[in-house]
Amino acid sequence: MLPRQPRPTKLRCSCGARVKYEKRTTWRGDRWLGVCTNASCGLWTTSLGDGEEDDNALVEFLLDGRPAPANTPPQVRLFLRYAALGWRHHHEGCVACNRRLVMSLDLDPLPNRPADPAHVHVCLDCGYLVVIAWMLDEWHELHVPGEGWQEPAVSVLILKRALEARVTSAMPGRGLDHR
């Protein structure tokens, strides 16, 4: 016989409002997270009335005891999300950090998006980005330092939309969300 899973017992918050629970079922059993329904309170609990709530209770609920994933730089997330578009290793190193971890992508033109970039180079190490576009009858290079990914520069946002347009044109109805 399986041991009985503890269930939420705290139905009211200390402010008097109802506590709403969500259950997460994993191979290790059920985990519960309760949030006060009073918008001005918003306290949360993972306590099930079977002992003190430990300091890692929220991490335990969200990650099921696994370590938190390391932060993945935004340029790497973009590269991985759109890897199927055919990135290749760039023949030159990064102009900012001199590393050889630079990837390139040629973007086929789309008739409804004439202002999209034609070529992109991104250093997966430091994030230095070069966006090459045909504008006003000549090639223009927009250089974005690695810090441009933190509060995305316009060039980064344009690149994300251009890549998404390529994915959705190749697979209608299968677009990716912008995270």
Image (tube, helix red, strand yellow):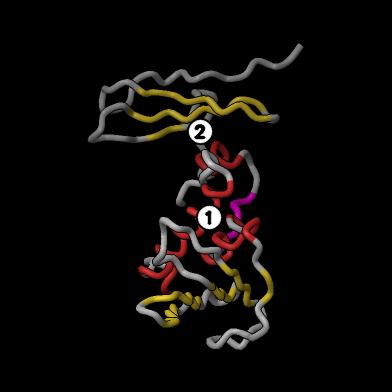
Q: Amino acid at mark 1?
A: Arg
Q: Please, is residue 174 above or below residue 74 in the view?
A: above
Residue 178, image x, y percentages: 45, 51
Q: Residue at x 58, y 20 (%)?
A: 6
Q: Nearer the viewer, residue 160 or 69?
A: 160
**Over which residues does the magenta segment extend?**
67-72
Q: Residue at x 65, y 15 (%)?
A: 4
Answer few, some or many: residues within 10 Å of disc 2's Cα (few below 14, many 20 plus, some between 14 and 19): few
Q: Nearer the viewer, residue 68 or 44?
A: 68
Of the image marks 1 and 2, the number of the one nearer the N terminus:
2
> What residue occupies the far right of the structure in this picture?
1
Residue 118, image x, y percentages: 51, 71
CA gap, disc 1 and disc 2? 52 Å
Q: Where is residue 114, by image quadrant?
A: bottom left
> What residue occupies the far top of the structure in this picture?
1
- Dominant SS of magenta comes to loop
Residue 75, image x, y percentages: 54, 66
- Please name the residue that numbered disc 2 is placed on: 52
Q: Residue at x 42, y 82 (%)?
A: 138
Q: Amino acid at mark 2?
A: Glu
- Please name the residue that numbered disc 1 is placed on: 166
Q: Please, is residue 172 above or below residue 35 in the view?
A: below
Circle 1/circle 2 CB separation < 8 Å: no
